[in-house]
C-alpha cells in the first residue's frame, strides 16, 4: 500500500481536497480527528495535558478546552512545543494502527491529511506529498469565518506555521485552491494520475 500525505497551511483548503478523494473511495486518515481522540476525557493525552498545563485547560466534560489551548499555543511557541510533545507521539500510534488495518485489507492507496508534515520532517515517511495552497487574503478570510476570530488572530495563527514558499520547496505536488472547486478537482485528478496511473473519479 502507498500512503500519500495531504498537507497545507491552516484554512488552505485541505478538507475540500480530502472530500474529493473520499468521494473517489480513497481511504482518508485525518490527523485532526486523531488529535481530537487523543485528548478525550480520561485519555492518556488529557492526563498529560492536565499535568503540564493545569486543570484550566480542560472543559466541563474533562476533555481539552480547544479554544483556550489554541489561544495559548498560537501566541506561545514553548507552549505549542509542549503540547505537540504530548499529542504527536499519541497521534503517531493511532496512525500506525490505522495504516496496519488498511494494509491487512489490501487497500492500494491511502491519504494522511495533516497540517504539520513539513514542520515535523515527516515527508520521507510517505510515498509522495501533496501541498494545498491558497492566496493569503482568501486564507485569512476563510480562517476568520471558520474560527470566528479577528484578522490579527488569523494572521498570528498563520505566522505560527511554516511559510507556504518553504513548503513548496519540499513537496512533490501543489494544488492551488484559490479558484473554483472544479479547478481544484482538475488539478487533483491530474496529480492522482501521475501518482497512480489511475483515473480519480470524484
Image: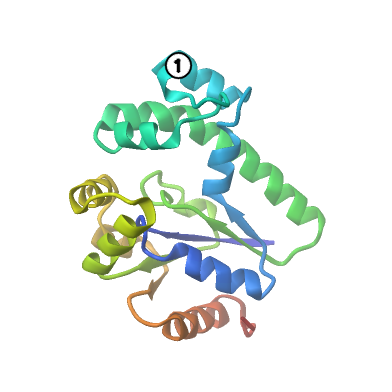
Nearer to us in this view, 196 or 101: 101
Query: Can residue 129 be seen in the rendering of this structure?
Result: no
Name the residue at 44% across, 36% down.
66
Nearer to us in this view, 57 or 158: 57
Q: Residue furthest right?
A: 105
Is 2 placed left or right of 48 in the picture?
A: right
Nearer to us in this view, 201 or 149: 149
Name the residue at 40% across, 67% down.
132
Name the residue at 32% across, 27% down.
79
Is 97 placed left or right of 124 in the picture?
A: right
The residue at which mark 1 appears reads as 55
Q: Quadrant of the N terminus?
A: bottom right
The chosen color scheme is: rainbow
Q: Which of the 4 image quarters holds residue 37?
A: top right
Q: Quadrant of the C terminus?
A: bottom right
Q: Circle 1 — which element?
A: helix
Q: Which of the 4 image quarters holds residue 71?
A: top left
Q: Position of residue 57 (x, y in %)?
A: 42, 24
Q: Position of residue 131 (x, y in %)?
A: 40, 65
* Mark 1 closeness class: few <14, some 14–19, many ≥20 residues within 10 Å: some
| 51 is higher (above) or lower (below) than 150 | above
Name the residue at 35% across, 81% down.
179
Query: Can residue 102 be seen in the rendering of this structure?
Result: yes
| 12 is higher (above) or lower (below) than 51 | below
| 180 is higher (above) or lower (below) than 47 | below
Q: Position of residue 197 (x, y in %)?
A: 62, 83
Q: Position of residue 20 (x, y in %)?
A: 57, 74
Amino acid at each position: 500500500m502507498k500512503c500519500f500525505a495531504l498537507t497545507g497551511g491552516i484554512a488552505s483548503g485541505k478538507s475540500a481536497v480530502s472530500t474529493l478523494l473520499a468521494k473517489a473511495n480513497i481511504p482518508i486518515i485525518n490527523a485532526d480527528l486523531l488529535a481530537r481522540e487523543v485528548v478525550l476525557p480520561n485519555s492518556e493525552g488529557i492526563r498529560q495535558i492536565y499535568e503540564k498545563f493545569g486543570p484550566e485547560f480542560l472543559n466541563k466534560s474533562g476533555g481539552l478546552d480547544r479554544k483556550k489551548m489554541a489561544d495559548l499555543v498560537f501566541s506561545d511557541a514553548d507552549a505549542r512545543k509542549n503540547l505537540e510533545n504530548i499529542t504527536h507521539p499519541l497521534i503517531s500510534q493511532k496512525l500506525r494502527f490505522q495504516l496496519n488495518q488498511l494494509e491487512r485489507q489490501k487497500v492500494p492507496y491511502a491519504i494522511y491529511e495533516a497540517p504539520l508534515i513539513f514542520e515535523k520532517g515527516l515527508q520521507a515517511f510517505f510515498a509522495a506529498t501533496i501541498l494545498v495552497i491558497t492566496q493569503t487574503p482568501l486564507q485569512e478570510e476563510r480562517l476568520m469565518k471558520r474560527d470566528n476570530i479577528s484578522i490579527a488572530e488569523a494572521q498570528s495563527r498563520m505566522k505560527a506555521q511554516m511559510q507556504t514558499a518553504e513548503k513548496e520547496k519540499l513537496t512533490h505536488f501543489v494544488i492551488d485552491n484559490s479558484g473554483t472547486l472544479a479547478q481544484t478537482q482538475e488539478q487533483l485528478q491530474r496529480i492522482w494520475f501521475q501518482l497512480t496511473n489511475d483515473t480519480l473519479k470524484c
